[in-house]
Amino acid sequence: MLIRVTVNGLPRAADVSPAMSLLTLLRDELELTGSKNACEQGECGSCTVWLDGELVCACLVPAVQADGGEVRTVEALSHGDDLHPVQDAFLEAGAVQCGFCTPGLVVATADLLARDPHPTDDAIREALAGNLCRCTGYQKIIEAVHLAEEALA
Ligand code: FES
Ligand code: FES
């Protein structure tokens, strides 16, 4: 079926099957490959995007559910080489290793800091609990969130 969705502020239309996920729509149809596909089971958070202002795992959301909605992806946060402060903070803190988890963590962190500009470590752990990282051990991610917090203050 034909769906229309606003993605990163731009109106987009796509012909989707009932089985297609929002993640497949974004990556394969709209060529927005920032959101990663690491598990496709809602377990890792690497596909995290905003749908109508709420964080979702795009791999779990049928694309048809976004019809008439508004999606924001990690691509909305940077402008060319001009990175979002959260992205800069992840690089500065050494919180990016293989990078597969990073887009989802960046989106979840940006969402957290918009809601809670000065989160405690516990609040950060809770907010990012759905985003798995196999590489960094999480301490550098928490440092990155605090660096971003300072940059955005
Ligand atoms: S790819 Fe969506 S949660 Fe892992
Ligand atoms: S940096 Fe590799 S999974 Fe997080």
Image: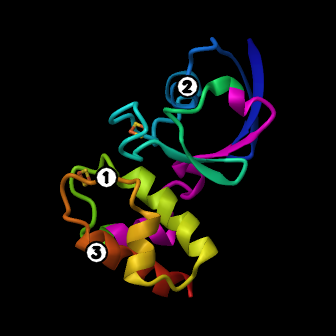
Q: Left or right: where does residue 136 sit relative to residue 33? A: left
Say what amino acid the circle numbered 1 marks.
Leu
Q: How far apart, in angstroms, are the residues tagged by discs 1 and 2?
A: 20 Å
Q: For residue 83, say whether it is visible.
A: no
**Which residues are drawn in magenta?**
65-90
Disc 1 C-beta below 8 A from ligand 2 = yes
Disc 3, SS = helix
Instruction: Check residue 8 for magenta coloring.
Output: no
* Residue at mark 1: 132
Residue 21 circle label: 2
Q: For residue 15, say whether it is visible.
A: yes
Mark whose residue sits in front, 2 or 3 = 2
Mark found first going from the N terminus, 1 or 2: 2
Say what amino acid the circle numbered 3 marks.
Ala
Disc 1, SS = loop
Dividing the image into four quarters, tell me where ligand 1 lies. top left
Q: How far apart, in angstroms, are the residues tagged by discs 1 and 3?
A: 17 Å
* Residue at mark 3: 93
Quadrant housing the N terminus: top right
